[in-house]
Image (cartoon, rainbow, N blue to C red):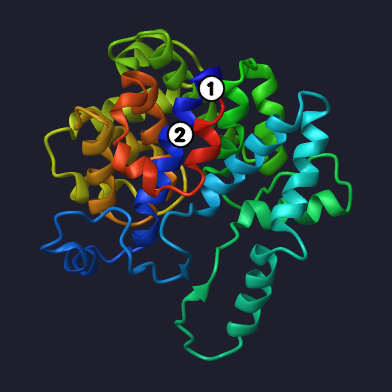
């Protein structure tokens, strides 16, 4: 596919596959939901305790990448400014995301409310970004959380051939967290190594950057994760962090990757572990698509993924 967009397809399909079980943190409940099911991807009945969207659609993580993809398809001029405008249009006032944010604020006033929002869930980074764009703040990205929105936003941009220095600008549109920036760049280095033919990008990365002061903590964590390879994946995810934040979401992703032989195996393993599966599979799906090619993505999954057609059309 043009511009290595099969990598973005890998992330998108994985997100849609995991989405109905997004943010199920109780692993015992999760096992009940999938028990006896031969197929537990693309569940028809939503099991996310926070929000409910139609099966086949993607979470807010992948959606910010779809907004960048749309921006790139328009043309290659003034990408940063047009991306900001498209973020406001897709997530800001007047959008279903913003409507649901207001609904959540209303529901918080109800004591012990445990309802499920009908429609998509807007992430903290995107809330801050929309507000910062409105007041014309120079640095528009959110600074309250260390999550994967920056990586997801920049993935299509990266695949169009932009260099790592330019990537930082795009990531910073949705997050100014130094931790998020660092881990996003690590993910892009690993995907880049995979696209360039490295047989084991994780080993290549740790060798290449073992003396790099910026990535030192990441390399050390990756070594620790390798030492946990033989431990059951759900147990490791619970230990490293089931939530959306770095470094947990990255380290849990690495554990899934080193214990999987292909795309499908890694995505199923990640879904079974629970928690913020979508933040993890957006990287894992992209990684295996880069490593193994477009044919590693199950065709039946592609057909069930709502945004897949638009990506496939870019041949």
* Residue drawn where x is 28% and y is 51% of the image: 271
| Label 1 SS | loop
Report the residue that reaches farthest toward the right. Answer: 136
Q: Which of 126 and 295 is in front in this view?
A: 295
Q: Earlier in the sequence, mark 2 or mark 1?
A: 2
Residue 165: horizontal and vertical position, in percent?
67, 18
Residue 46: horizontal and vertical position, in percent?
36, 68
Residue 193 can be seen, yes or no = yes
* Residue drawn where x is 45% and y is 27% of the image: 7
| 229 versus 166 height, above or below | below
Q: Nearer the viewer, residue 97 or 137?
A: 97
* Residue drawn where x is 56% and y is 27% of the image: 314
Q: Measure how far apart labels 2 and 1 are at the Cα level.
A: 12 Å
- Say whether residue 255 is left or right of residue 221: left
- Give the number of the disc on residue 9: 2
Residue 64: horizontal and vertical position, in percent?
61, 45
Q: Which of 238 and 167 is in front in this view?
A: 167
| 84 versus 225 height, above or below | below
Q: Which is in the foreground here, disc 2 or disc 1?
A: 1
- Say whether residue 133 is left or right of residue 104: right
Q: Nearer the viewer, residue 307 or 36?
A: 307
- For disc 1, the marked residue is 315
Report the residue that reaches farthest toward the bottom. Answer: 111
Residue 251: horizontal and vertical position, in percent?
35, 37
| 313 versus 90 height, above or below | above
Mark 2 is surrounded, within 10 Å at the Cα level, by few (under 14), some (14 to 19) or many (20 or more) other residues, namely many
């Amino acid at each position: 596919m043009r511009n290595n967009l099969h990598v973005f397809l890998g992330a998108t399909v994985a997100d849609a596959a995991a989405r109905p079980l997004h943010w199920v943190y109780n692993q015992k409940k999760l096992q009940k939901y999938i028990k006896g099911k031969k197929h537990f991807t693309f569940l028809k009945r939503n099991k996310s305790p926070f929000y409910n969207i139609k099966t086949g659609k993607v979470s807010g993580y992948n959606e910010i990448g779809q907004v960048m993809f749309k921006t790139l398809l328009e043309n290659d001029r003034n990408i940063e400014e047009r991306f900001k405008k498209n973020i406001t249009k897709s997530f800001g006032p007047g959008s279903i995301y913003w409507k649901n944010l207001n609904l959540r604020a209303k529901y918080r006033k109800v004591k012990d409310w445990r309802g499920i929002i009908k429609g998509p869930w807007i992430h903290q980074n995107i809330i801050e970004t929309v507000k910062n764009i409105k007041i014309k703040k120079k640095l528009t990205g959110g600074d309250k959380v260390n999550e994967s929105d920056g990586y997801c936003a920049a993935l299509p941009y990266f695949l169009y051939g932009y260099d790592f220095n330019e990537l930082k600008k795009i990531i910073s549109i949705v997050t100014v967290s130094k931790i998020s920036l660092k881990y996003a760049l690590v993910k892009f280095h690993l995907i880049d190594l995979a696209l360039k033919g490295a047989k084991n990008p994780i080993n290549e990365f740790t060798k290449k950057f073992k003396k790099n002061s910026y990535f030192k903590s990441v390399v050390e964590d990756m070594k620790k994760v390798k030492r946990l390879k033989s431990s059951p994946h759900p147990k490791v995810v619970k230990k490293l962090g089931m939530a959306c934040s770095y470094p947990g979401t990255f380290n849990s992703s690495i554990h899934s990757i080193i214990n999987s032989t292909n795309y499908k195996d890694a995505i199923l393993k990640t879904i079974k572990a629970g928690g913020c599966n979508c933040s993890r599979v957006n990287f894992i799906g992209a990684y295996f698509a880069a490593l193994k090619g477009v044919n590693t993505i199950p065709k039946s999954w592609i057909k069930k993924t709502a945004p897949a057609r638009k990506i496939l059309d870019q041949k």
